Amino acid sequence: MEKAYDPEDFRERGHRLVDELADHLADKLSGESGKAIHWNEPEEELQFWQKFLANGDKNALFPEITKRITHIHHPHYIGHQVSPTAPITSLTAMISGLLNNGMAVYEMGMAPSAMERVVTDLLCKKIGYGDLSGGFLTSGGTLANLTALLTARRMNVDSDIWNGGMHHQLGIMVSEEAHYCIDRAAKIMGLGEDGIIKVPATQDYRMDTGLLEKKYREATAKGVHIFAIVGSAPSTATGMFDDLGAISAFAENKQLWFHVDGAHGGAAIFSDKYKGLLSGIEKADSVAIDGHKMLMMPTITTALLYKKSSHTNATFSQKAEYLLTESELEDWCNSGKKTFECTKTMMSIHWYTLLKMYGEEVFNNFVTHLFDKGTEFAEIISTHPNFELAVNPMCNIVCFRYVDKDLNQEQLNQLNAGLRKQLLEEGEFYIVQTKLKSVHYLRVTVMNPFTTRTHFQRLLAKMLTWAERTGPWALL
């Protein structure tokens, strides 16, 4: 026990690890050496770590973890919507990990609870909410979206479902292009397939708001009580923003709760250039924004903001006398009353530290630059004879594919899947893939501010070389 808690051992290991991580950061940001991913088959990776636990050098543990991982800070990492963290947030994560205040109640997280209030108040102001607004931080967009829909049900359904159960069919409206976590939330809530009213998307993959009235009437005619509508800002697959203004007008007309899933693009509230994409968000009843996507923070932290702060306390109502007692203090400081989590990390430290050290301008620069890079990559693709876009992007998410006039649709799907597989196994670049209306696309999310036009051109050249050198059929 004394060795496990030895301050000097911690100091020595900590200094060595910071040096190793700083070297890793310098190496990956330059993009001059190494790969974006060192791919290994799952069973082989499992066997390595099984053997390492039994026989590996314990002093090599941290270097092995750092090596055998996807390198988010490499400019060739243009895959998932995960931020290359600002290095200082690894230090705030260390503070949270060591001090380990769970934050369910104020006395178990005094500083981070106050910081959380400062951060959420600022976010509400940036959204355009008034003085009655408020919010909290929680563990990820999936949990934030579920919590928001639970709040919507609590506020827009007459019966007390939390205590009495559900006795009739309830439903929500959402675009067919929305993130899968909305479906998951609805099913967790017991709405089932009948309670998920999918609104078709337009040709550019945005919710077709012209069909809202029709879909609403069809559902209500079947006895579905719709209580909420969700706007995507943006959809995950394509990065396209729904028309939040049109959705808010519909929600107001039908007296529905309006929630915005801004997990990725909600960060544009900080961008002078791109905040117009979020026009209408100020009318939403609730908004989710991830810190670990477009705000430079480590996984996993999400802000859930409400137009009316009183709604944060209405979602859950239960007794836990040893913990959730009535307090003379305002409820903002007792997060256990508002979130699924009882214990959560001191995630507010990440947000507060970035704001304190670099100011809001760092978020403005980060979001604006990466959205600009999405446009730049799209422009390169649109002028290339061997590639085509799925849709002109609205942010830093770009869907595209290799094309060959001699191949049919199914063959093109197989070809693009083969190109992505080869990229993954070769490891120099990391991109992902998606299917849109049965068409297989390669999908890039530009998350690294050090990814340049040269990197984009090298990626396309590599794929083109593979296709031409081996012939399309070799990749099928």
Image: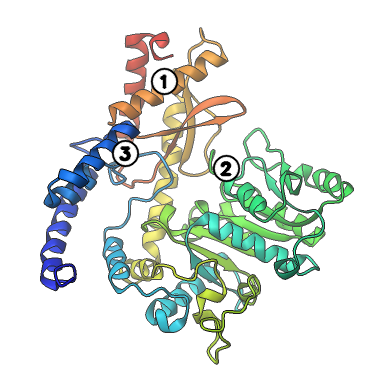
Task: From the image, state whether disc 3 or disc 2 is nearer to you.
Answer: 2
Q: Residue furthest right?
A: 221
Side of 296 where 329 appears, left or right: right
Q: Hey, what amino acid is under mark 1?
A: Gly
Q: CA distance from mark 3 to mark 1?
A: 25 Å
Q: Hey, what amino acid is under mark 3?
A: Thr
The residue that mark 2 highlights is 240
The reply to whether residue 283 is visible in this rendering is no
Q: CA distance from mark 3 to mark 2?
A: 22 Å
Q: Secondary structure at mark 1?
A: helix
- Residue 19 higher or lower than 99, as above or below: above
Q: Secondary structure at mark 3?
A: loop
**Percent from the top left, x then y, of residue 77?**
33, 39
Give the total number of marks visible in the rendering: 3
Q: CA distance from mark 1 to mark 2?
A: 26 Å
Instruction: Please name whichever residue, 146 or 471, is drawn nearer the observer in this view of the structure.
Output: 146
Instruction: Work out which quarter of the rendered image holds the C terminus and state it.
Output: top left
Q: Hey, what amino acid is under mark 2?
A: Met
Among numbered discs 1 and 2, the one appearing first in the sequence: 2
- Residue 304 higher or lower than 187, as above or below: below
The reply to whether residue 85 is visible in this rendering is yes
Dot 2 crowding, Cα within 10 Å, few <14, some 14–19, many 20+: many
- Residue 55 higher or lower than 295, as above or below: above
Instruction: Work out which quarter of the rendered image holds the N terminus and state it.
Output: bottom left
**Percent from the top left, x then y, of residue 83?**
37, 51
The residue that mark 1 highlights is 418
**Percent from the top left, x then y, of residue 401?**
47, 24
Residue located 29% across and 46% down the image: 73
The residue that mark 3 highlights is 452
